[in-house]
Amino acid sequence: MLHENSVFHQLQQHIPWAVLCRLVDKHKADHRVRRLTAKSQFLALLFWPAVGRCQPARD
């Protein structure tokens, strides 16, 4: 069976994760985080427009 990545996975491959990790460490963004890490939150915000709702999350 042929394996195909989802569009979201293909999009994630172009993100410079090393830069994100360096910024998270620099600003201690994951200090005392229990559930939603900075990477998880970034991916959630990236996925938000793709689920059909093109309005900002705050509306």
Image (cartoon, rainbow, N blue to C red):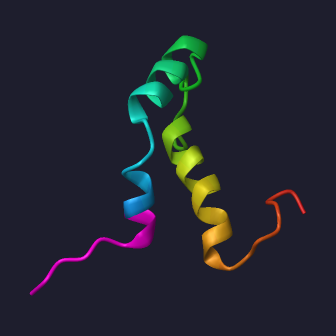
**The C terminus lies in quadrant:** bottom right
| Residue 53 drawn in magenta | no
Residue 52 falls in which quadrant of the image?
A: bottom right
| Residue 4 drawn in magenta | yes
Rendered position, 2 above or below 36: below
Q: Position of residue 9 (x, y in %)?
A: 38, 62
The magenta segment = 1-9
Residue at the top extreme?
26
Using residue 8 as the reference point, say whether residue 4 is left or right of it.
left
Q: Position of residue 47 (x, y in %)?
A: 58, 63
Rendered position, 56 above or below 39: below
Q: Position of residue 56 (x, y in %)?
A: 82, 61
Q: Position of residue 45 (x, y in %)?
A: 64, 54
Tell which of 50 and 24 is nearer to you: 50
Using residue 52 as the reference point, say whether residue 21 is left or right of it.
left
How many tags in the picture? 0
Using residue 58 as the reference point, say whether residue 6 is left or right of it.
left
Name the residue located 79 percent from the left edge and 60 percent from the top edge. Answer: 57
**The N terminus lies in quadrant:** bottom left
Name the residue located 61 percent from the left edge and 71 percent from the top edge. Answer: 50
Name the residue located 46 percent from the left edge and 26 percent from the top edge. Answer: 19
